[in-house]
Image (cartoon, rainbow, N blue to C red):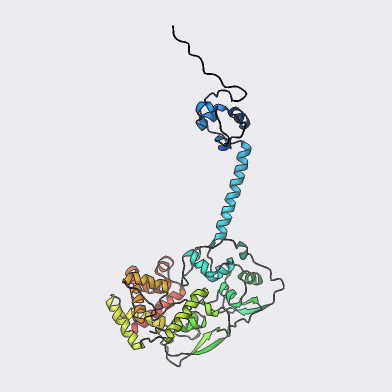
């Protein structure tokens, strides 16, 4: 006779749920959510509260022993109710909208007339932080449609036009080369206020001679011209930088052909020169540079003013020798150096472009890597070497010489993707004219 096997003792109904009938965990109509077991819970009570069966919960959570032994704080995957699904969907939409708003605040799409300085002012951030966030330099050129990341992303209200509210105003006459952001910076008028006063937007187009309302608390520059007498070492680009005007507007004001060579004592008309402006020392061609860059430029200019530098003829010979050593056409190197500085090592721009070849420090580091030597841009020979190896790289990568020349001014990537800008074309023509003489 077979031995009788006693059945296992059943758990007390008062402390445990009934034995679950294991079912296949079918997909929940509204998805799944998490439930945390509380004191006194049983699987049956949870199933009843959620509106499901114990078998579904056992299968979904792979519970051993039919789910008789639950622990406080244990997380179970349970079907989401229709009401909870609606709440979760609402929260998801709200979170998505918040993320989209954050992205909108943290990203700005460049429009016609924008400058880095203007965008920084509009968004209430420093130009230095804007440059750093986007990996840009003071010489970077913006493209319409380009996306710029805004550091901090907390100044969305800065882009809303503000009411003039009885603000004292005066008139500003638009000059050739002006941009709305440049005018805002020059006249110390918040860009949003400038828009509001003149019923403009970021897409508005301005034209020379147009009258704009600006804040009346600061003396505003007029469209009149002033004179400048050419001195030894001057170049048109250097004069333009010194007076805060574009090279193109300087050429136009004096009806100069690109091939014209300046002569000592020559009188030039400088368009729209300002008697005084707090921002003019930081601004050139519509771009405002951070005080750190301008300060570095001033220190380098002071250092070079006290340093011994080669004469023009000596500098010319150094350019020719360096170009030949690196396989660059000497006439091209001479033309670029003449356009940039007039072969003058003491020339330093507001953007901290230094010396004979007007190389900024970041480009100097690039030149150091290409030349295999540590470049000191304050040393004439190093400066020439930097410019020449950059030209060598450009001529090797560009489709033609014109594109290489444009790349030295605008950046080769920008030229190849967006084409030459108007001022770049002026620059290329000037270089080619110089080159024909060398």
Using the image as rendered, state which of residue 183 and residue 383 is in the foreground: 383
Q: Residue at x 32, y 73 (%)?
A: 373
The C terminus - image quarter: bottom left
Q: Is 428 drawn above or below residue 149 in the view shown?
A: below
Query: Is residue 407 in sight in this rendering?
Result: no
Tell me where residue 85 sits by quadrant.
top right
Horizontal and vertical percent for residue 47?
59, 29
What's the residue at 50%, 28% (across, down)?
A: 64
Task: Residue 172: name its quadrant.
Answer: bottom right
**In x, y percent, where is residue 149?**
52, 62
Picture layout, residue 144 above or below residue 243: above
Pick the residue in front: 184 or 195. 184
Image quadrant where one finds the N terminus? top left
Q: Nearer the viewer, residue 227 or 425?
A: 227
Q: Nearer the viewer, residue 57 or 322?
A: 57
- Left or right: where does residue 146 sit relative to residue 326? right
């Amino acid at each position: 006779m077979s031995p009788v096997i006693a059945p296992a003792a059943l758990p007390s109904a008062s402390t445990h749920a009934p034995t679950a009938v294991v079912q296949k965990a079918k997909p929940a109509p509204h998805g799944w959510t998490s439930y945390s077991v509380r004191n006194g819970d049983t699987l049956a009570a949870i199933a009843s509260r959620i509106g499901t069966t114990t078998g579904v919960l056992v299968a979904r959570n792979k519970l051993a022993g039919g789910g008789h032994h639950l622990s406080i704080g244990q997380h179970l995957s349970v079907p989401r109710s229709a009401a909870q699904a609606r709440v979760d969907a609402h929260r998801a939409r709200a979170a998505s909208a918040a993320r989209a708003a954050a992205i909108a605040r943290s990203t700005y799409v460049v429009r016609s007339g924008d400058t880095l300085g203007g965008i920084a002012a509009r968004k209430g951030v420093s130009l230095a932080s804007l440059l750093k966030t986007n990996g840009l330099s003071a010489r970077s050129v913006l493209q319409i449609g380009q996306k710029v990341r805004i550091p901090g992303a907390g100044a969305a209200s800065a882009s809303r036009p503000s009411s003039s509210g009885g603000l004292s105003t005066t008139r500003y006459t638009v000059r050739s080369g002006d941009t709305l952001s440049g005018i805002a910076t020059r006249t110390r008028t918040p860009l949003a206020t400038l828009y509001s006063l003149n019923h403009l937007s970021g897409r508005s187009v301005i034209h020379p001679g147009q009258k704009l309302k600006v804040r009346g608390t600061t003396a505003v520059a007029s469209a009149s011209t002033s004179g400048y007498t050419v001195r030894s070492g001057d170049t048109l680009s250097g004069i333009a930088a010194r007076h805060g005007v574009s090279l193109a507007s300087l050429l136009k004001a004096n009806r100069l052909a690109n091939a014209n060579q300046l002569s000592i004592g020559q009188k030039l008309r400088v368009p729209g020169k300002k008697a005084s402006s707090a921002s003019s020392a930081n601004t050139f061609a519509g771009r405002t540079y951070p005080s750190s860059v301008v300060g570095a430029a001033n220190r380098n200019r002071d250092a070079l003013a006290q340093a011994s530098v080669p004469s023009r003829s000596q500098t010319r010979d150094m350019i020719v020798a360096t170009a030949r050593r690196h396989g660059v056409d000497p006439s091209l190197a001479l033309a670029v150096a003449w356009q940039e500085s007039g072969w003058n090592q003491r020339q330093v721009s507001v953007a901290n472009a230094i010396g004979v070849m007007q190389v900024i420090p970041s480009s100097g580091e690039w030149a150091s890597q290409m030349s295999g030597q540590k470049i000191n841009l304050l040393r004439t020979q190093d400066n020439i070497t930097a410019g020449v190896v950059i030209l060598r790289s450009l001529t090797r990568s560009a489709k033609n010489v014109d594109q290489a020349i444009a790349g030295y001014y605008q950046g080769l990537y920008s030229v190849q993707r967006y084409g030459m800008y108007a001022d770049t074309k002026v620059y290329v023509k000037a270089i080619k004219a110089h080159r024909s003489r060398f």
